Every structure is written in C-alpha cells, then in structure tokens.
Image (tube, rainbow, N blue to C red):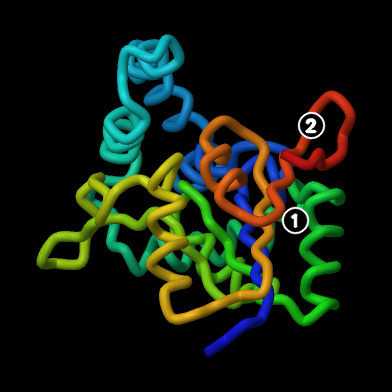
Amino acid sequence: MNTTPVAFFDFDGTLTTGDTLLPFLKYVVGAPTYYTKLALLSPVLGAYATKLLRNDIAKEIVLKQYLAGYPLKELQDIGKRFNKEIIPTMLRPEGIERLEWHKAQGHDCVLVSASLDVYLKEWAGSYGFTASLTSSLKQDEFGNVTGHLNAANCFGWEKCLRIETWIEARKPEVTYAYGDSEGDLQMLQSANEGWRFSSRSKRFIRV
C-alpha cells in the first residue's frame, strides 16, 4: 500500500496567473478567428457569467465552436508548442514554489484541472507530476474532435470524484490540495490541508 503524501494542484489561477483554456483556443485558431468567434459566443458567455447556463454546457458550446473537426493528434502537437511558448509566461511563482517544495519532500503531486489534456498532460509530465486528472476531448471514428468532452467536466465535485478514483489503492499519510476558485472548494475541503490562493494578499491561505 502506497502511503506517500499526495499534493493535488489545480492549474488555472493556482499554478498560473489566470485561465489557460481561452489562450489555448486563441493559439490554435489565431487572433482574428478567435475574436470573431468570441463575439458570436457572447450570449453563451453572458448566460454562464450570470449562472443561467451550467459550466459544462457552456464549455462544450465553446469547444465545439473552436475545435470541432480538428484531428486530436494535431491539437496535441499544438499543445506541445503552446506549453513551450505561452505557459511559461503565465506561471504563478507562488504556486510553482509550493509544487517544488512538495516534490523536494518526495511527495506525489497530481494535477487536477478542468482544462484540456491535449496540452496539460504533456506539461504535467514535464513538471514531474505523478498523474494528471483533467478534462479530455471526445473524438469521432476518424480521430477528429467533436467539441464534446469524453466525460464530465473536471470541475467542482467532479474533481473530488476523480481524486477518489485515483487514490483508491493508496493510503497516503496526508493529502494536500491547492486551488484558487469556488470550483476548487470541494477539493480543498476534502484534503487534510487545503490551501486557496488569495489574489488580494498574493499568498496561499489555509482553508
């Protein structure tokens, strides 16, 4: 039985200074197309912002608008370039410092994010994560992305469910969790030590 302590990290806003999904979509399609489609999606984004539309539904509408029809392999290749060119400019020093501390203690580190595995899986591997629990894209019989998610959006309670599944065969001495938003609260509260990043004080505060 593996008793190694585990630290679970959200990505957007925790290890980075903000959202990475929209910058990734912009990177994929280019700025002109990105902003044109964003204008068309403004009613959807407005409905989501006012809680009239569920997170997962809004996300799939956005993904379908930007990514439907792309070969999954092409998006994975684009994701590798995105990781090298864009992600380094977005990393949050306070979050990376916590990650490096846990790695130095010999703890297992697991990335738990609603963002897409087409770029996060490779990034997590390059940063020494034991595993990455993320949202993934459904593909058709030809290997092209449909715009739908393979499973539930890895957000809110879904993060806890993914963690429970991953941790089933383990008995870690202690679990840590790091996040920054309401969508991370359940994950933070389920860990032995939950830490939420405060944009006001620019530090992690124990939940």
| Amino acid carrying mark 1 in the image | Pro
Point out residue 55 in the picture as x, y percentages from the top left corner.
37, 30
Point out residue 2 in the picture as x, y percentages from the top left corner.
57, 86
Between 75 and 185, the residue placed more toward the observer is: 185
Residue at numbered disc 2: 198
For the residues bearing labels 2 and 1, Cβ distance under 8 angstroms: no
- The residue at the point 39 percent across, 14 percent down is 51
Q: For residue 70, which quarter of the picture? A: bottom left
Point out residue 53 in the picture as x, y percentages from the top left corner.
31, 19
SS at circle 1 = helix
Between 144 and 168, the residue placed more toward the observer is: 168
- The residue at the point 38 percent across, 67 percent down is 165
Residue ranking furthest to the left = 141
Please, is residue 76 above or below residue 183 in the view? Answer: below
What crowding class fits label 2: few (fewer than 14 Cα within 10 Å), some (14-19), or many (20 or more)? some
| Amino acid carrying mark 2 in the image | Ser
SS at circle 2 = strand
Q: For residue 73, which quarter of the picture? A: bottom left
- Name the image quarter holding the C terminus: top right
Please, is residue 80 above or below residue 41 in the view? Answer: below
Of pointers 2 and 1, the one earlier in the residue sequence: 1
Q: For residue 138, which quarter of the picture? A: bottom left
Between 75 and 199, the residue placed more toward the observer is: 199
What crowding class fits label 1: few (fewer than 14 Cα within 10 Å), some (14-19), or many (20 or more)? few
Q: Is residue 132 left or right of residue 180?
A: left
Give the numbered dot on residue 88: 1
Point out residue 38 in the picture as x, y percentages from the top left corner.
42, 23
* Of the two numbered discs 2 and 1 in the rendering, the one whose residue sits closer to the viewer: 2
Residue ranking furthest to the bottom = 1
Q: Is residue 155 left or right of residue 201?
A: left
- The residue at the point 75 percent across, 56 percent down is 88
- The residue at the point 51 percent across, 51 percent down is 113
